[in-house]
């Protein structure tokens, strides 16, 4: 069974960046990014990459970020 853990602090994002865990991104209660890696983050933007040339920029205030962890 898997657990969804919400990412909200810089430490959360730093952890998934270092461990190269895939995240899910929601905006307005809709899934907009299903399985991507965090490439870079700052106070306002989270940059994710799901493929070689598929890079997305997500506004930190407008989106919710979750990591799917296995038990």
Image (tube, rainbow, N blue to C red):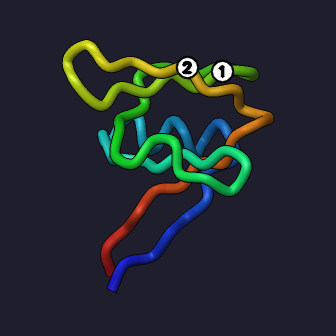
Q: Determine whether, in the image, residue 54 is placed left or right of residue 61.
A: left
User: Taking 22 as reference, is 6 left or right?
Assistant: right
x, y percent for residue 19: 32, 43
* Residue at left offset 67%, top offset 44%: 27
- Are the residues flagged by discs 2 and 1 in contact, CB closer than 8 Å? yes
- Which residue is at 26% across, 13% downward? 53
Please provide percent x and percent y for residue 29: 68, 56
**Res 50 quadrant in image:** top left
Which numbered disc flags the more N-terminal residue, 2 or 1? 1
Left or right of residue 38: residue 27? right
13 over 6 or under it: above or below: above
Residue at left offset 40%, top offset 63%: 68
Q: Residue at x 79, y 34 (%)?
A: 61
Q: Which mark is residue 45?
A: 1
Q: Which residue is mark 2?
A: 57
Residue 23 horizontal/vertical position (percent): 43, 48
Report the quarter where the C terminus lies. bottom left
Query: Residue 15 or 67: which is nearer the viewer?
Result: 67
């Amino acid at each position: 069974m898997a657990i969804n853990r919400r990412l909200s602090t810089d430490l959360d994002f730093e952890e998934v960046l270092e461990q190269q865990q895939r995240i899910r991104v929601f905006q307005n209660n809709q899934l907009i990014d299903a399985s991507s890696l965090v490439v870079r983050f700052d106070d306002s933007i989270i940059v994710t990459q799901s493929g070689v040339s598929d890079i997305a920029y997500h506004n930190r205030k407008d989106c919710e970020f979750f990591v799917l962890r296995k038990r």
